[in-house]
Image (cartoon, helix red, strand yellow):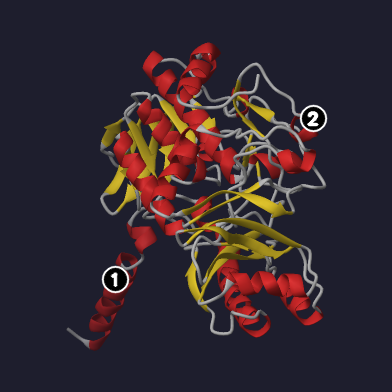
C-alpha cells in the first residue's frame, strides 16, 4: 500500500467516525432538534390523581381518599406541604375579620384544614389561632406553624388516609382523549410511567397538568417571586421591643410558643422609618414581619424579586434563585447589624427553591371577580366560604363577612374531568389576592378532592356531578357554610 492509498483510507475512516460520534445524526435527529424514540410505558391505575402535594394538594388527596377513592399524589420534592411550609409568614385565615368590624367571631374554614392544625397543636407545631392584638384590620388571627412538623403531620395524615404518595416524582405530561384526561405521565428514578385515573386535580401551583392537558391559560406575571429564610439565635421579644421603641407601625399576636401560652408569635413592621435599614430592606425586597412557634427563632423573613418574565421561564428562574439567595444572606446581616437580640443570628432554613404567588392562570368555568369577594357574594354551588383579603385594610370583605367559592370556579374549561385549585384560579389580580392565600387553597383542596372522588365513583364528568351530593359530603366532613 503506497502513501497516497494509506492517506485516503485514513480520511474515509475519520469521516465515518465523525458521523458515528454525532449523536443527533446517529439517532435520527437533525439540526437543533432530536426525535425521541417511542416507548411503551408501564401503567398504574387509580380513581383520582392529584398533581402537586402542596397547600391544596395535601388536603385534596386526603379528602379524595376518605371518600373511598384510590388516590395517587404526585410531588416533585421529597415531602408534602408546599407554600404552607416555604412561602408565607402565617396561614391566612381561618376566621372572618370580626375584630375590624365588631361583628360575630366565626371560624369559616374548618374540616381537614382544621384537623391539620389540631394535629400540629398536639406536637407543639402551631401557635394556635392567636388573636391579633394590633393590625387586626388585616387579619383577626395569626396561625403560625412549625414548617418541619407540618411536613411530617401532612405526610402522616396522607398515609393514614391510604393515599399513594409519590414524592421525588416529576409530572412530565398528560394523556388526553378528546375532552378527557386519561392519564398523567410521570418520571422518577424508577423510570417513566403513566398514571391512569377517572378524575384529576391540578395543585401544582404552576398549572402544569392543565397546560399538558391542553387547557387554556394565561401567564400574567403579576407578582414577585420570593424565598424565605428562617433565622436562628434571635430574640423575638427584643425584636418587638425594637419595633415599639422606634414607634414603627407593627403587628403583634400572642399564642403558644415553645410550650408556653401568651407569648409573642407574630411581630414586625409594615414599613421601617430608620433610613439605613429601610433602604437596605427595600434593596433586597425584604419584609419585616415574621412569625414563630419557638423561642430564639424567626420562622420567615421573606425576600421578594420581580421577574421580567413568567416564573415558568427556567432560565430566568435560574438567575433569580441565585439573586434571592444573595438577598437572604444580606437579610440575616441586616438583622445582626440593626436589631437588638439578633447580633449572633444565623441562617437556619431556606426553601429548596423560590416560591411563586402565581404561575399560569387556568381558565375555568367561572372566574371569581373582585366584587364577588368584596361584596361577600354567595353561590348556589359553593364548596367553601372565605373571609380574608391580603390587601386589607385597603380591600376588605363587606361587614366582616365571607364570600363563597363556587364549584364551577374549580372546573377547568373544556376538560371534562380536571379540577384546578389554589393559586391557578381567578384572573383578576385583586380578587386573586384573596383566593391565592393558604387557607383558601386548603379549603379549595377539600372541595376538589371530594368532588373528584364522587365523580370517579359515579363514572361521571365534573359537570355531571349533582351538587347536592357534593354539598352533603362536604358538610359531613366538617366544611362550614354560611348559607
Circle 1: element type: helix
Near-viewer residue (17 or 344): 344
Q: Residue furthest left?
A: 1
Label number found at residue 375: 2
Label number found at residue 252: none
Near-viewer residue (278 or 339): 339
Near-viewer residue (7 or 391): 391
Where's the N terminus, which quadrant? Answer: bottom left
Residue 149, compared with residue 404, is above or below; it is below
> Is residue 177 visible in this depiction of the protein?
no
Circle 2: element type: loop
Using the numbered discs, state the Cα–Cα distance from disc 2 to disc 1 in whole angstroms: 73 Å
| Residue at 49%, 38% in the rendered image | 114
Nearest to viewer (mark 2 / mark 1): 2
| Residue at 43%, 45% in the rendered image | 53
Tally of marks: 2
Query: Sequence-wise, which precedes: disc 2 or disc 1?
Result: 1
- Which residue, given by chain and number where applicable, does mark 1 sit on? 17
Amino acid at each position: 500500500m503506497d502513501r497516497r492509498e494509506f492517506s485516503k483510507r485514513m480520511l474515509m475512516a475519520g469521516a465515518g467516525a465523525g458521523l458515528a460520534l454525532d449523536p443527533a445524526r446517529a439517532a435520527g435527529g437533525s439540526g437543533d432538534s432530536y426525535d425521541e424514540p417511542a416507548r411503551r410505558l408501564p401503567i398504574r391505575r387509580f380513581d383520582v390523581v392529584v398533581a402537586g402535594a402542596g397547600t391544596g394538594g395535601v388536603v385534596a388527596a386526603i379528602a379524595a381518599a376518605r371518600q373511598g377513592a384510590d388516590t395517587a399524589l404526585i410531588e416533585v420534592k421529597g415531602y408534602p406541604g408546599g407554600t404552607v411550609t416555604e412561602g408565607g409568614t402565617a396561614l391566612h385565615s381561618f376566621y372572618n375579620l370580626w375584630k375590624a368590624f365588631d361583628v360575630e367571631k366565626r371560624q369559616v374554614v374548618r374540616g381537614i384544614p382544621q384537623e391539620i392544625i389540631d394535629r400540629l397543636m398536639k406536637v407543639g407545631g402551631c401557635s394556635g389561632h392567636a388573636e391579633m392584638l394590633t393590625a387586626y384590620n388585616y387579619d383577626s388571627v395569626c396561625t403560625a406553624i412549625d414548617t418541619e412538623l407540618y411536613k411530617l403531620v401532612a405526610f402522616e395524615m396522607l398515609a393514614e388516609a391510604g393515599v399513594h404518595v409519590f414524592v421525588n416524582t416529576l409530572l412530565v405530561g398528560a394523556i388526553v382523549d378528546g375532552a378527557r384526561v386519561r392519564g398523567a405521565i410521570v418520571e422518577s428514578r424508577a423510570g417513566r410511567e403513566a398514571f391512569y385515573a377517572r378524575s384529576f386535580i391540578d395543585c401544582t401551583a404552576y398549572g402544569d397538568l392543565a397546560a399538558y392537558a391542553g387547557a387554556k391559560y394565561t401567564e400574567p406575571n403579576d407578582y414577585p417571586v420570593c424565598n424565605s429564610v428562617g433565622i436562628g439565635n434571635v430574640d423575638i421579644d427584643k425584636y418587638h421591643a425594637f419595633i415599639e421603641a422606634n414607634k414603627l407601625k407593627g403587628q403583634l399576636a400572642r399564642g403558644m410558643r415553645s410550650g408556653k401560652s401568651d407569648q409573642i408569635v407574630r411581630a414586625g413592621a409594615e414599613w421601617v422609618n430608620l433610613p439605613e435599614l429601610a433602604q437596605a430592606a427595600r434593596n433586597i425586597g425584604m419584609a419585616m414581619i415574621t412569625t414563630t412557634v419557638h423561642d430564639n427563632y424567626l420562622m420567615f423573613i421573606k425576600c421578594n424579586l420581580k421577574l421580567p418574565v413568567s416564573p415558568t421561564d427556567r432560565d430566568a428562574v435560574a438567575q433569580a434563585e441565585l439573586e434571592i439567595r444573595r438577598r437572604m444572606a444580606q437579610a440575616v446581616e441586616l438583622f445582626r447589624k440593626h436589631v437588638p437580640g439578633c447580633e449572633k443570628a444565623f441562617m437556619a432554613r431556606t426553601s429548596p427553591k423560590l416560591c411563586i404567588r402565581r404561575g399560569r392562570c387556568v381558565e375555568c368555568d367561572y372566574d371569581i371577580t373582585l366584587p364577588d369577594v368584596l361584596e361577600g357574594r354567595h353561590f348556589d354551588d359553593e364548596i367553601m366560604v372565605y373571609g380574608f383579603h391580603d390587601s386589607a385594610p385597603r380591600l376588605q370583605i363587606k361587614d366582616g363577612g365571607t364570600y363563597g367559592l363556587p364549584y364551577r370556579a374549580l372546573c377547568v374549561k373544556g376538560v371534562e374531568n380536571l379540577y384546578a385549585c389554589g393559586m391557578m384560579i381567578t384572573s383578576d389580580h385583586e380578587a386573586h389576592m384573596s383566593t391565592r392565600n393558604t387557607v383558601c387553597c386548603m379549603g379549595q383542596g377539600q372541595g376538589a378532592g371530594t368532588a373528584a372522588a364522587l365523580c370517579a365513583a359515579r363514572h361521571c364528568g365534573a359537570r355531571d356531578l349533582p351538587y347536592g351530593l357534593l354539598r352533603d359530603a362536604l358538610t359531613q366532613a366538617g366544611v362550614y357554610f354560611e348559607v
